[in-house]
Image: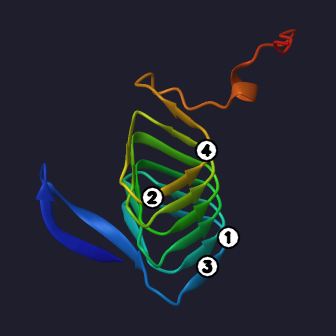
């Protein structure tokens, strides 16, 4: 763990850095920020920020307060606040967030759902018993 020198509201932000060349298989969970320049095969959860660097690769779901993608992600991305797709980002999967920013050059193949309701349930989780799909 690395502690940043940023001081925000009386507490320091802890950040986990996964360097280029590191490969992780399984679930990754962190209360602080995560910077990923290596590879993760599995889900990532953070109560803060997840940054997938230009060399970073994720094959799994990412859940965080905010998410910035500069590398390659295959899977669902869910951010409570915002998702940023940088110019070299390549995302194959769905996005659920309040705000979405896509830079020129980014590749995004999937669906996006935006809003400030804070409701990040999938359609199957929000349907009621007896509901029938629309035809």
Mark 2 and mark 4 lie on one chain; the one further toward the N terminus is 4
Picture layout, residue 79 above or below residue 117? below
What separation in Å lies between label 3 and label 2 (alpha carbons)?
25 Å
Residue located beneath label 4 in the image: 94
Which disc is residue 73 wearing?
A: none
Quarter of the image for residue 11 reads bottom left
Which disc is residue 24 wearing?
A: 3
Image spot of residue 61 (x, y percent): 62, 55
Left or right of 3 in this view: 78 = right
Residue located beneath label 1 in the image: 26
Name the secondary structure under disc 2. Answer: loop
Name the secondary structure under disc 3. Answer: strand
What separation in Å lies between label 2 and label 4 (alpha carbons)?
15 Å
Quarter of the image for residue 16 reads bottom left
Colour mapping = rainbow
Q: Residues within 10 Å of mark 2 (few under 14, many from 20)?
A: some
What separation in Å lies between label 3 and label 1 (alpha carbons)?
6 Å
Residue located beneath label 2 in the image: 106
Is 17 or 78 nearer to us in this picture? 78
Does the residue at mark 3 contact the one at mark 1 (Cβ under 8 Å)?
A: yes
Does the residue at mark 4 contact the one at mark 3 (Cβ under 8 Å)?
A: no
Image spot of residue 19 (x, y percent): 43, 84
């Amino acid at each position: 763990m690395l502690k940043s020198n940023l001081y925000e509201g009386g507490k320091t932000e802890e950040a986990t850095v996964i360097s280029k060349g590191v490969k992780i298989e399984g679930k990754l969970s962190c209360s602080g920020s995560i910077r990923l320049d290596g590879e993760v095969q599995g889900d990532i959860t953070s109560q803060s920020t997840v940054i997938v660097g230009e060399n970073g690769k994720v094959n799994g779901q990412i859940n965080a307060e905010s998410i910035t993608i500069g590398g390659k992600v295959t899977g669902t991305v869910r951010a409570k606040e915002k998702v940023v797709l940088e110019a070299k980002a390549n995302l194959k999967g769905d996005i659920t967030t309040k705000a979405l920013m896509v830079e020129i050059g980014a590749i995004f193949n999937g669906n996006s759902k935006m809003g400030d309701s804070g409701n990040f349930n999938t359609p199957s989780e929000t349907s009621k018993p007896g509901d029938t799909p629309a035809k």
